[in-house]
Image (cartoon, rainbow, N blue to C red):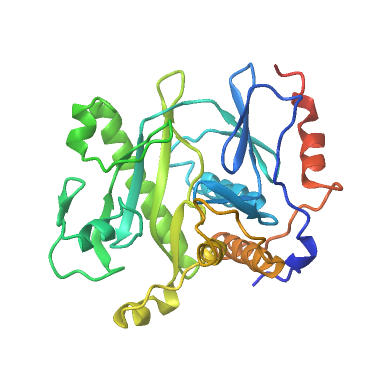
Amino acid sequence: MPSIDFAAFASRTLDDATIPELPNHYRGKVRDNYDLADGRRVIIASDRLSAFDRILCAIPFKGEVLTQTARFWFEATADICANHVLDYPDPNVLICRRLDILPVEIVVRGYLAGTTGTSILTLYKQGQRTMYGMTLPDGMRDNEKLAEPVITPTSKEFDGGHDEPLTAAEILERKLLTPAQWEELSATAIALFKRGQQMAEERGLILADTKYEFGVAPDGTIVLADEIHTPDRSRYWRQASYEARFQAGKRPDSFDKDVVRSWVAARCDPYRDPIPDIPEDLIASTAAVYAEAFEMITGRSFAPDLEGDTVLERIRTRLAPLFDGR
């Protein structure tokens, strides 16, 4: 575990990344985006923790961990696929190319796992054996390894709709992607996932599944966007305990970042009721989990950037050269 007193940094969080001097602000659930006139996008990863379609709290260093974990993976996979990265002026900030995001999210799965309505485990437990254009055998168990990684694409709903499972045939019939785009995305996603699995295994981890997002550059090139292999977009399990827990029918040991979500859900209806104050020790322990995930995934020590009186002040200082980039 990282040797940092996370409780001491409870107030050093970035819960709002509004910078009026930057143009075209779009505030997402956990990231603030700014589009510059020259085609670049500034993405600031806040420390906001989102669940139940609302913000629950801010976790110290969460945005920094996710940005730097994605940076590690973008650099480790650049030989497989071009990505949108241009610069990292701050640990929480990515400057990237603005892309036309493709309307299909590519989820790659190596295990029969998941909890969402579109996960293969959920569908399998409902009795489905044919899904996403593939057929799974009877008799599989929760969290069992698949013979080969599979792609389970879903529609990307941009206006708050629900993602839907898709087959390759449906993607082509609905003209969401061209045949050439689908072929390239499929091959690229599998190659990225296998690289991720290999590197995770070297660090004592199992990369069970992950989600990729791709966009198209002005010249028509397909480019990897958003983030890659972060603990928020991927399911990581600890390798050493997997087999014993699987044989015992237990859930694999993972980086459990859902403790805040579970704590809230046990105390109220999180979709309707006011969110109760979340204990500082719970916030600190969640920060420690994110930092531990960074260290195990990357093999590097987590050393947070503590410059500036606040995180926002530090970011504003480093982004000041862009303030005339309207």
- Quadrant assignment, res 251: bottom left
Q: Residue at x 57, y 63 (%)?
A: 260
Q: Position of residue 80 (x, y in %)?
A: 42, 42
Q: Quadrant location of the N terminus?
A: bottom right
* Number of numbered markers: 0
Single out the residue that lies furthest toward the front: 273
Location of residue 308 in the rendering, given as x and y in whole percent from the top left corner: 85, 46
Which of the 4 image quadrants contains residue 249? bottom left
Locate residue 17 relative to residue 133 in the image: left or right: right
Q: Which of these two is toward me, 152 or 96? A: 152
- Which residue is found at the position 26% from the left and 56% from the top? 120
Question: Along the line of sight, which residue is nearer the eye, 195 or 321?
Answer: 321
Question: Where is 29 relative to 325, above or below?
Answer: below
Horizontal placement of 56 versus 281: left or right? left
Relative to 313, say whether 252 is above or below.
Answer: below
Relative vertical location of residue 95 with respect to residue 163 in this rendering, above or below: above
Residue 301: x and y in percent read 67, 63
Furthest residue in direction right, as rendered: 309
- What x and y, as percent, mark residue 310? 82, 47
Residue visible at 65% across and 68% down?
A: 282
Say whether residue 50 is left or right of residue 37. Answer: left
The residue drawn where x is 38% and y is 51% is 193
Quarter of the image where the C terminus is located: top right
